[in-house]
Image (cartoon, helix red, strand yellow):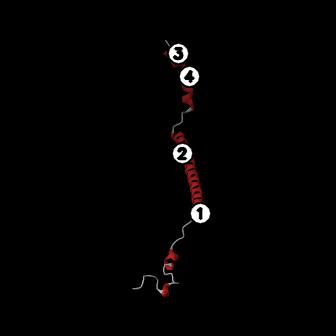
Amino acid sequence: MKPYGTRASNVNKHPGDILKADQRKRRTAEEMKAVRKEEAAAQQVRASEEKAKLERKAQLLHELAAIEAETVSAEEARLQPSVPQSATANLQVILPVLARHSQP
């Protein structure tokens, strides 16, 4: 019996090299640190952009609420009946008289 081993025709052949070509090479620890640092910086940028967007939305909502309040108050003032000048003059005369009569 022959001892098991590599055939003479396969000594210089590497059939597994085909599979190795498809595999991704692993990154070194330094490369991973750099990648993580870049990802953290990108995440910070995204977070600051998101915060700026939220602040801008809040500012716009605040401005919109102020405009709506101003519009509503102007609309209410326009819809309220105005007091005629003669009525105000009458009140100026009547109020002191009422004040004198209501005192004991």
Is mark 2 in CB contact (under 8 Å) with mark 4? no
The image shows residue 87, relative to residue 4, as above or below, that is above
15 vs 63, left or right, is left
Residue that mark 1 sits on: 31
Q: Nearer the viewer, mark 3 or mark 2?
A: 2
Q: Secondary structure at mark 4?
A: helix
Mark 1 and mark 4: span between their CA atoms? 91 Å
Which of the 4 image quarters holds residue 87? top right
Using a 10 Å C-alpha cutoff, classify the residue at mark 4 as few (fewer than 14 neighbours), some (14 to 19) or many (20 or more): few
First in sequence: mark 1 or mark 2? 1
Rendered-image quadrant of the N terminus: bottom left
Q: Amino acid at mark 4?
A: Val
Q: Residue at x 55, y 45 (%)?
A: 62
Q: Nearer the viewer, mark 1 or mark 2?
A: 1
Using a 10 Å C-alpha cutoff, classify the residue at mark 1 as few (fewer than 14 neighbours), some (14 to 19) or many (20 or more): few
Residue that mark 3 sits on: 100
Q: Secondary structure at mark 3?
A: helix
Q: Residue at x 49, y 16 (%)?
A: 102
Residue 65 is tagged as 2
First in sequence: mark 1 or mark 4? 1
Using a 10 Å C-alpha cutoff, classify the residue at mark 2 as few (fewer than 14 neighbours), some (14 to 19) or many (20 or more): few
Mark 1 and mark 3: span between their CA atoms? 94 Å
